Image (cartoon, grey):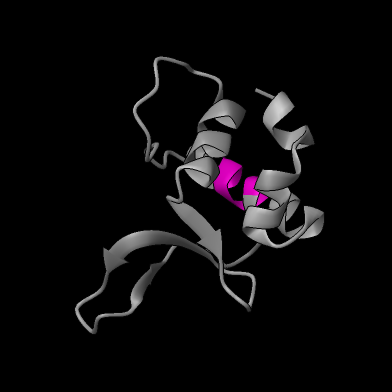
């Protein structure tokens, strides 16, 4: 699982190591607060779930650092904002 973090592909996918660590941290907070995983895995390892969500293009950071889920929209057609607000 942590081998994926050593590869440049995941770093480049999110735009750098700082953005990768920010995305992981924000998503782990959501999952720890009861957020449902966006990937089907037979693992309870939350870090592994988040890494797979990134690799499968399920989550990303906006230019302003907000965590977003690909494909989910609000009534206005904007992507659903999942930022915890106080992070």
Point out residue 33 in the picture as x, y percentages from the top left corner: 49, 41
Classify residue 25 as left or right of residue 42: right
Residue at position x 27%, y 70% in the image: 73
Which quadrant holds residue 65? bottom right
Look at the image and tell me in which quarter the N terminus lies.
top right
Look at the image and tell me in which quarter the C terminus lies.
bottom right
Is residue 22 positioned above or below 10 on the image? below
Classify residue 12 as left or right of residue 42: right
Question: Which residue in the rendered view is the most extreme toward the bottom?
Answer: 76
Count of number-bearing discs = 0
Q: Is residue 7 visible?
A: yes
Is residue 64 positioned above or below 40 on the image? below
Residue at position x 55%, y 38% in the image: 50
Is residue 29 positioned above or below 76 on the image? above
Q: Is residue 84 visible?
A: no
Point out residue 31 in the picture as x, y percentages from the top left corner: 49, 39
Q: Is residue 28 magenta?
A: yes
- What span is colored magenta in the figure? 24-29
Residue nearest the viewer, comparing 44 with 13:
13
Q: Is residue 80 magenta?
A: no
Classify residue 83 as left or right of residue 6: left
Is residue 20 positioned above or below 76 on the image? above
Point out residue 18 in the picture as x, y percentages from the top left corner: 80, 57
Give the prevailing secondary structure in the magenta stretch: helix
Residue at position x 57%, y 72% in the image: 62
Residue at position x 56%, y 47% in the image: 27
């Amino acid at each position: 699982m942590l081998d994926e973090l050593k590869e440049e592909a995941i770093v480049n996918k999110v735009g750098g190591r700082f953005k990768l660590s920010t995305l992981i941290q924000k998503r782990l907070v959501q999952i720890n607060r009861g957020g449902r995983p966006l990937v089907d895995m037979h693992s309870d390892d939350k870090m592994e779930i988040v890494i797979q969500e990134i690799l499968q293009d399920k989550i990303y950071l906006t230019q302003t650092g907000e965590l977003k889920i690909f494909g989910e929209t609000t009534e206005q057609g904007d992507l659903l904002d999942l930022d915890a607000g106080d992070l």
